[in-house]
Image (cartoon, helix red, strand yellow):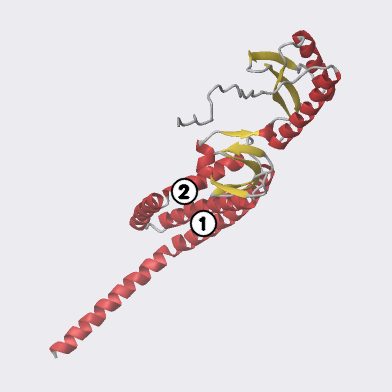
Amino acid sequence: MFENFSINESLNKIGTKLGSWLDSIILNLPNFLLAILVFLVFIFIAKYVGNLINRLLRRKVKQASIREMSVKVLKAIIILVGFFIALGLLNLDKVLTSVLAGAGVVGLAIGLALQGTLNNTFSGVILSFLPQLQIGDWVETNGFAGEVKEINLRNIVIKQSDNNYVIIPNGKIVEEPFKNFSRTLRSRVMLNCGVAYNSNLEFVQDLTKKTIANSFPQKGNEEVEFMYEEFGDSSINFVVRFWTDVTKNRDILIAKNKAVIEIKKAFDANDINIPFPIRTIDFTNKLSIQKPEKES
């Protein structure tokens, strides 16, 4: 009889509990439906905003991986906001607090574990929006020079002049200075040379400037500059500076090659000597290499 009473009491408690749950569900059904509706609305908003941002980023960011990652992060943030609002409508404040606390702890742990990776990721996002560095530019950075072929969320890929590829982490690009040849259409090229000590220095100066100006037309305020630098061991050395079209390092080499040829032709036509170091070997050694004769 005692066992029957315990079973009946347990069944009554279960029935009472289920009844209270049913009443709670009925009372909170409007809030539940409203929470679902709000969450679905935020999903729709995330999709619409993602498509809009993707179209806007196409004008600024050439790299598809950067655009896709940015859109996904934005959509995830909007959906999370909708999720938290839905939890608030269901009066699940404690659950919301627990979720935020757990997310904070997990985020901190992931951030510490992936510190270098996250640094490169955020640096990649920064680089994708910088006008100073774009795909196709010729840059020098971290001891390497080449054409930028790719900018992704971890690194940039540079193709060097020897046709080899160099992968540099984005963090290195952001933290270290880099030189971009493609940001300016015109650059100044400097060429060093020397003439013999018996040369007419004023004539050499005028001839060199005229030769370079004819080969490389100067624009606007640009001009050919000529300066003697020093009395060298076998020549009086000078530097000539001029402007030309440069968008990569190869353009500088081409300009120097042409300038050397034209200057050499002009100097040869006017009997101007470009001396080179001469080594004189003295054989006047007075020491005898013959062995002295032995006395008999």
- Relative placement, left or right, of 229 versus 79 is right
Q: Where residue 75 sits: x, y (%)?
A: 55, 53
Q: Where residue 60 sits: x, y (%)?
A: 66, 42
Identify the secondary structure beneath mark 1: helix
**Mark 2 residue crowding within 10 angstroms, few (<14) / some (14–19) / many (20+):** some
Q: Is residue 153 above or below residue 216?
A: below
Q: Considering the image in quadrants, where does the N terminus appear?
A: bottom left
- Relative placement, left or right, of 3 versus 32 is left
Q: Where residue 70 sits: x, y (%)?
A: 57, 49
Q: Which residue is mark 1?
A: 38
Q: Residue, x 36% and y 66% (percent of image)?
A: 24
Q: Residue, x 60% and y 21% (percent of image)?
A: 284
Identify the secondary structure beneath mark 2: helix
Image quarter of residue 227: top right
Q: Residue, x 80% and y 10% (percent of image)?
A: 203
Q: Which residue is mark 2?
A: 118
**Mark 1 residue crowding within 10 angstroms, few (<14) / some (14–19) / many (20+):** some
